[in-house]
Amino acid sequence: MNRKISNGKRKGLEAVSGSRGVIAAVAIDQRSALRRLFAGFLGAEPETVPAEKLMQFKEAVSRTLTPHASAILLDPEYGLAAARERAISAGLLLAYEKTGYDQKVPGRLPGLLDHWSVERLAEAGADAVKVLLYYSSFSSADVNDRKHAFVERVGAECAAADLPFFLEIVSYAEGMEDKGIDFARVKPEVVTKGIAEFSKLEYKVDVLKVGVPVNLKYLEGSPSASGEIVYSREETKRYFQSAAQCAEIPFIYLSEGVSNEAFLHALELAAEAGVKFSGVLCGRATWKEGVQVFVEKGQAALEDWLGSEGTRNIENVNQRLAAATPWFAISDASPVNRG
């Protein structure tokens, strides 16, 4: 069922999508995850990675890849300089959440950046605000009620500022390895229930950013398949369909750190299943390999890599978006003529 959308939110969504109303965005709001990538190649502890390195990397990604993207997702901690480097045609999403979570506290509870608000993100140039939430339908009622209230607060703040709210749902289950086979078996249910929950009106979410409902490592015929198989191809398409049918608002896929080849395979499956997804916010599947290039060979080599391999990666994803459904076909809003 289509929902009414305000003029301000409509303009924000148009700013981060292409002329077809499909979101083809590059994500590089990673902070702790990016530090870990750098640390692995530097042979150092993540906390010792200089902030300047993260900023330089983000700037290079923004400068080189946004001419091929409808928008870029950055963080206000290390990404504001990169935001200024983006192509004039690319919109800007800014992350509002703190990176990671306190591992000493059960439930992977979320938190917001201390010195930021939705209004401040808008003043920094954001066309839309993104918040990441770890969510599991298997968590306790208390943990999930805290998360529901958290999302309601962010939704209200975005509504007051008339700025689109993108909610990124990262699925997990307590006591299970995120990439392990046990969670792979329950992932379809967790993803589907998360989509169903945050499609509800009270959260005021405009776009859901979700992972595909299977772990591609355990999918029959997947480029990343290794060892035991949990899902057949046909079964996987049914999981895609079941999850999508629970979405009452536009949703887009994230790459969850998989390879470009594996993410392309997932998008092809979504298309085969007839899923009405509205695009992607693709991060590491586009630029991950560039980290090693930057660490080992420097800035110029990174720019060369992004201009060739990185650009090829993002264009590969863009080609798979021919099957995507415009967000305004899901939300009750007409597209703006972008001239």
Image (cartoon, rainbow, N blue to C red):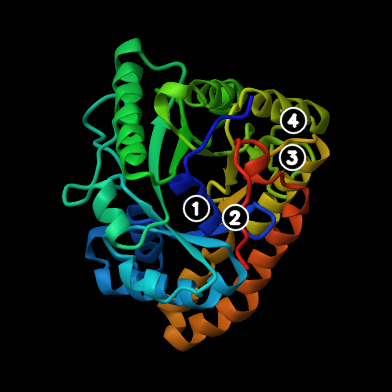
Kindly identify the amino acid type of the residue bearing the numbered disc 1. Answer: Lys
271 vs 339: above or below: above
What residue did someone put label 4 on? 236
Counting residues from the start of the chain, the first of labels 3 and 1 encountered is: 1
Decide: few, some or many residues near mark 4? Use Cα within 10 Å; few <14, some 14-19, many ≥20: many
Q: CA distance from mark 4 to mark 1?
A: 35 Å
Counting residues from the start of the chain, the first of labels 4 and 1 encountered is: 1
Q: CA distance from mark 1 to mark 2?
A: 7 Å
* x then y, percent, for residue 240: 70, 31
Outermost residue toward the top? 141
Q: For the point 46% across and 29% down, which residue is it?
A: 172
* Closer-to-camera residue (94/179): 94
* Numbered tag placed on residue 336 in the rendering: 2
- Of badges 2 and 3, nearer the viewer stands 2
Outermost residue toward the left? 115
Counting residues from the start of the chain, the first of labels 1 and 2 encountered is: 1
Counting residues from the start of the chain, the first of labels 2 and 3 encountered is: 3
- Of badges 4 and 1, nearer the viewer stands 1
- Of badges 3 and 1, nearer the viewer stands 1
The C terminus appears in which quarter of the rendering? Answer: bottom right
